[in-house]
């Protein structure tokens, strides 16, 4: 029998597998309940779903038997209109996740480094590891703000090739001030600003105006959150034409399937509908945050995204997450450094958010009763 273990790249064999969210039907099975009863607030998905026009567009696709457009011509034209950036500065990926992977494969040689600002989205460090890259960790401060001075110093090392900043940051929802992004862009690195949640902020153009000045800036966006298309996998990058030229060379030619293309085009034609739902989510985010702040055993962080991070001041985040799960409410909990005892709750429909608040009050009562015994 041939031994395959030694064929696996050593650095890959070392990687801890990424733990993605559990799909609702699996959760329902584990809980012995109906999938309809699961309230999924663990992956920042859009509770309103996609625009209704998406279903029609998907039903109408004729050329399933043909390969999709490798140049993403229609999609980039529509995105040019949406972002105000020329089509030459746009490249689409199968989710923003694919673009993170491609960017790192473009610049990281084995042993090279990236700068990461945890707690943050896990894919930057994960994809760097796949390239046999190393991560220079510059922890965020207690309020999740960035230490850009340290990043500036770290960027001088010749092995550092890229840095990643999520803004708004996942999992807390804070935005990096423009001045900080501007100063980071002066680092001699690829500076990737992940704006997956930018549509939930007051300025949906984010820092895209900086593209004029910085050929090393890459802005990552996605249709997963605001447009409700997480299942179809569509993201895009805004970047200099110079950088785009090289990214095109390594992109799989047919990375955007015809369904994702049709759905994205339909979404970009239904902006009024989608923006109305974004406004509902933003207003619910504020209502949910206020209600959570009234619970004295939670510390609630300010968020400009479609989720709210809370630190559990009594008991553990795991216990809280399990208690909510018994009510069919799935939230994400954390145990790593900087996020100990934190849970992230995605903003759901108003009735979902009501159920979260009620469940938390009930959990509080139960705790008090046990404490009384
Ligand atoms: C959800 C998320 C993404 C992933 O986007 P996809 O387009 O679904 O791959 C990227 N970055 C951040 C910060 C996210 O939270």
Image (tube, rainbow, N blue to C red):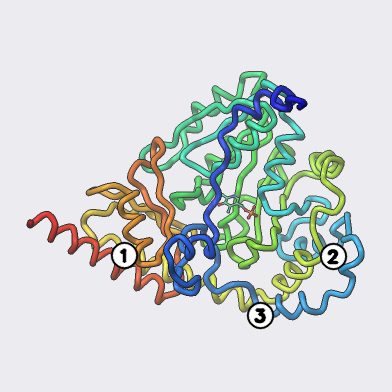
Which residue is under mark 3?
A: 52
The number of callouts visible is 3
Residue 268 to residue 216: above or below: below
> Within the image, what quadrant is residue 293 found in?
bottom left
Which residue is under mark 1?
A: 290
Residue 135 to residue 39: above or below: above
Q: Nearer the viewer, residue 270 or 148?
A: 270
**Residue farthest toward the top in the current orientation of the protein:** 158
Which residue is under mark 2?
A: 74
Residue 111 to residue 342: above or below: above
Q: Residue at x 83, y 47 (%)?
A: 252
Residue 42 image offset from top left, x and y in percent: 47, 58
Q: Residue at x 56, y 60 (%)?
A: 203
Q: Nearer the viewer, mark 1 or mark 3?
A: 3
- Cα–Cα span, label 2 and label 1: 42 Å
Q: Residue at x 84, y 58 (%)?
A: 72
**SS at mark 3?**
helix
**Residue farthest toward the right in the current orientation of the protein:** 66
Please report whichever mark, 2 or 1, sits nearer to the chain's N-terminal start.
Answer: 2
- Cα–Cα span, label 3 and label 2: 20 Å
**Residue farthest toward the left in the current orientation of the protein:** 373
């Amino acid at each position: 029998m041939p031994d395959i273990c030694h064929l696996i790249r050593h650095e890959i064999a070392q990687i801890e597998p990424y733990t993605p969210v559990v799909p609702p039907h699996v959760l329902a099975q584990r809980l012995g309940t109906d999938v309809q009863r699961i309230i999924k607030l663990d992956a920042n998905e859009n509770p309103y779903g996609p625009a209704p026009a998406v279903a029609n567009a998907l039903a109408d696709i004729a050329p399933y038997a043909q390969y999709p457009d490798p140049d993403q011509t229609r999609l980039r034209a529509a995105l040019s209109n949406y972002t105000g950036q020329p089509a030459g500065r746009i490249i689409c990926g199968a989710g923003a996740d694919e673009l993170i992977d491609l960017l790192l494969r473009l610049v990281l040689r084995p042993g090279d480094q990236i700068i990461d600002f945890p707690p943050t989205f896990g894919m930057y460090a994960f994809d760097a590891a796949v390239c046999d890259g190393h991560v220079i960790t510059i922890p965020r401060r207690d309020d999740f703000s960035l230490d850009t001075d340290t990043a500036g110093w770290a960027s001088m090392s010749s092995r550092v090739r890229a840095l990643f900043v999520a803004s708004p940051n996942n999992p807390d929802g804070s935005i990096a001030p423009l001045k900080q992004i501007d100063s980071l862009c002066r680092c001699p690195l690829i500076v990737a600003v992940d704006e997956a949640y930018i549509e939930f902020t007051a300025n949906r153009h984010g820092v895209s105006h900086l593209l004029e000045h910085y050929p090393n800036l890459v802005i990552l966006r996605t249709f997963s959150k605001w447009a409700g298309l997480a299942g179809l996998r569509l993201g895009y990058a805004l970047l200099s034409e110079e950088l785009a030229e090289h990214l095109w060379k390594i992109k799989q030619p047919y990375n955007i399937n015809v369904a994702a293309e049709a759905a994205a085009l339909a979404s970009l034609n239904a902006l009024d509908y989608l923006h109305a739902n974004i406004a509902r989510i933003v207003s619910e985010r504020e209502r949910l945050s206020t209600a959570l702040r009234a619970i004295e055993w939670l510390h609630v962080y300010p968020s400009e995204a479609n989720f709210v991070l809370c630190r559990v001041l009594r008991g553990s985040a795991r216990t809280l997450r399990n208690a909510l799960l018994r009510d069919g409410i799935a939230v994400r909990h954390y145990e790593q450094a900087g996020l100990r005892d934190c849970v992230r709750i995605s903003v759901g429909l108003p009735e979902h958010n009501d159920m979260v608040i009620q469940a938390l009050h009930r959990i509080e009562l139960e705790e008090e009763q046990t404490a009384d015994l």
